[in-house]
Amino acid sequence: MKKIIVLSFIVLTVTAVLSGCTPKKTVNEKIGEEIAEKMIEAQTGAKVDVDSQGEKITINSGEGQVQYSAGGQVDLPENFPRELIMASDAKIIMASSSEGNSTVSFVTNEEPMVMKERYISGMTGLGWIKEMEVNISQATMISFKKDKMNVAVNVGENNTKEQQGKSFININFATGEE
């Protein structure tokens, strides 16, 4: 599991190397994939295969597969519960998944405090137990548990000009099964 988490952080680092790729693999893309593979293998000791297709990256290792997608058209991971997205105008800007875990980030035009309250009431209404809430300045982190599943929701102001929306939401979902 620790290696999968390390892989996810490394993916974010190498995204810059792989960005701007076209569907047809270029020499630069192949070189970028090889560099990413070497970096991940050096950090984890696992044999990995990085496959970049446009804005989607898949990393295969002996411990499983990590998929990462960002940018234009980003879809929800298959293992991500749709009930956890609570904004009708959510524009997903990043998604990643591995066995039993997934993360989704999106922007919405809803105000951050409205979204915070929506998650608290919505999640508890779905049978989730609120375990923790941390408020720091204009951001809130809330964790929930239900059976063997855990969810961490981060709600804050969207400070980027590239993504239009008032709030930035990041949801981490884990099944607790490894």
Image: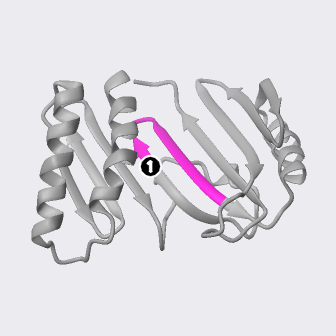
Residue 87: image location, x then y, percent: 76, 61
Would residue 49 be visible to someone looking at this image?
A: no
Q: Secondary structure at mark 1?
A: strand
In-front residue for pair 77/23: 23
Tell me: 15 left or right of 131: left
Q: Is residue 30 magenta?
A: no
Would residue 28 be visible to someone looking at this image?
A: yes
Q: Quadrant of the C terminus?
A: top left
The quarter of the picture where residue 98 lies is top left
Figure label count: 1
Mark 1 is surrounded, within 10 Å at the Cα level, by few (under 14), some (14 to 19) or many (20 or more) other residues, namely many
Q: Which residues are magenta?
A: 97-106
Q: Quadrant of the N terminus?
A: top left
In-front residue for pair 84/114: 114
Residue name at image x 12 percent, y 34 percent: 47
Does residue 112 sit above or below 89 in this rendering? above
Q: Is residue 105 magenta?
A: yes
Residue name at image x 31 percent, y 70 percent: 54
Tell me: 145 left or right of 26: right
Does residue 74 sit above or below 45 in this rendering? below
Residue name at image x 21 percent, y 43 percent: 60
Tell me: 121 left or right of 22: right
Tell me: 172 left or right of 40: right
| Residue that carries the numbered disc 1 in the rendered image | 96
Identify the colour scheme used. Answer: one colour
Q: Amino acid at mark 1?
A: Ser
**Is the magenta region chiefly helix, strand or loop?**
strand
Residue 151: image location, x then y, percent: 64, 34
Residue name at image x 69 percent, y 65 percent: 90
Residue 61: image location, x then y, percent: 20, 36
Does residue 8 sit above or below 86 in this rendering? above
Residue 58: image location, x then y, percent: 28, 52
